[in-house]
């Protein structure tokens, strides 16, 4: 199944009856220039100071505890300018906060990936198509079509020699598929991998980047 990528949502302000809860966020960025050195998370309309979060270029066990008072979180720069907003599922206790470059050279954004064992099982690959076009991944000769702007889970990637896979990536251009990626993926084993496909800010061409979650599910 493909999951529509919800990178942002409309603001949901804090109500008097909203029960505060704490969500553990592991923040990672796939681009060097976004979101910047200082990023703060807060609930929309909250008068509480924002929680500073650290966006890394990798995934491990380190997290930031953020108090959630509404159905979403907004992320601001040090100058208090809002740079992104994500919806927080009601039962989410933790998540991977993924900062992404813009589509069609637009502003950067963010999305929340639920990282519990059921939502993101060990041994799986989650493909994030953060482009404005459909993608096709050919993994050991088997095609996986990924619509524009969705999350596509692959529960157990096909493998060849040495428990690894030859992978080709194609992007839809009109009625044809254009090759943009060719590489070799190791099977995640008991770990999990996020494979992001984003547009290069200068060229607009798609680029693949893998993020291995070395800590495993919470």
Image (cartoon, rainbow, N blue to C red):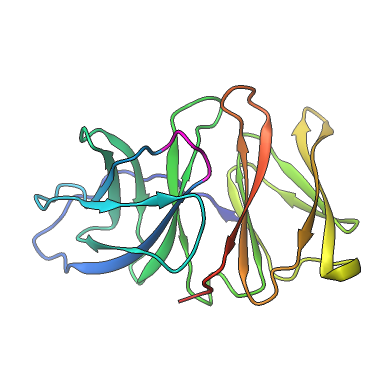
As displayed, is residue 46 above or below residue 125? above
Answer yes or no: is residue 175 visible. yes
Q: Is residue 196 left or right of residue 13?
A: right
Residue under the image location 59 percent in, 49 percent down: 150
Position above or below: 63 against 4: below
x then y, percent, for residue 196: 61, 48
Q: Is residue 33 magenta?
A: yes
- 95 magenta-colored: no
Q: Is residue 2 visible?
A: no
Residue 218's x, y, as percent? 45, 77
Q: Quadrant of residue 80?
A: top left
Number of labels in the image equals 0
Residue 161 picture location, percent across and down: 91, 67
Q: Residue furthest top?
A: 202
Image quadrant in which the N terminus is located: bottom right
Residue at figure coordinates x 78%, y 46% from the top left: 136
Identity of the residue drawn at 16% across and 64% down:
18
Instruction: Please tell me which residue lies in front, 207 or 12.
Output: 207
From what the image shows, is residue 44 above or below residue 23? Answer: above
Predominant SS of the magenta segment? loop
Q: Residue at x 43, y 36 (%)?
A: 34
Q: In screen coordinates, is 114 left or right of 16? A: right
User: Residue 203 sits in which quadrant?
Assistant: top right
For residue 85, side relative to residue 6 (left or right): left
Q: What's drawn in magenta, residue-wise?
A: 30-34
Q: Is residue 61 above or below residue 179?
A: below
Q: Position of residue 33 (x, y in %)?
A: 45, 33
């Amino acid at each position: 199944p493909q999951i529509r990528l919800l990178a942002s949502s409309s603001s949901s302000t804090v109500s008097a009856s909203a029960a505060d809860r704490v969500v553990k966020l592991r923040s990672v960025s796939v681009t060097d220039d976004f979101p910047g050195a200082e990023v703060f998370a807060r609930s929309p309309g909250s008068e509480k100071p924002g929680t500073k979060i650290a966006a890394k270029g990798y995934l491990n066990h380190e997290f930031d505890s953020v108090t959630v008072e509404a159905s979403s979180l907004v992320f601001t720069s040090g100058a208090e300018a809002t740079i992104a907003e994500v919806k927080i599922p009601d039962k989410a206790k933790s998540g991977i906060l993924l900062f992404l470059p813009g589509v069609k050279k637009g502003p950067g954004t963010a999305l929340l990936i639920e990282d519990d064992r059921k939502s993101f099982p060990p041994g799986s690959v989650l493909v994030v198509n953060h482009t404005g076009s459909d993608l096709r991944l050919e993994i050991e000769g088997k095609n996986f079509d990924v619509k524009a702007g969705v999350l596509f889970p692959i529960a157990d990637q096909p493998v060849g020699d040495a428990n690894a896979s030859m992978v080709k990536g194609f992007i839809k251009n009109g009625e044809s598929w254009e090759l943009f990626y060719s590489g070799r993926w190791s099977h995640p084993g008991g770990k999990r991998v996020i494979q992001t496909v984003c547009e290069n800010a200068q060229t607009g061409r798609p680029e693949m980047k893998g993020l291995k979650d070395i800590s495993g599910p919470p």
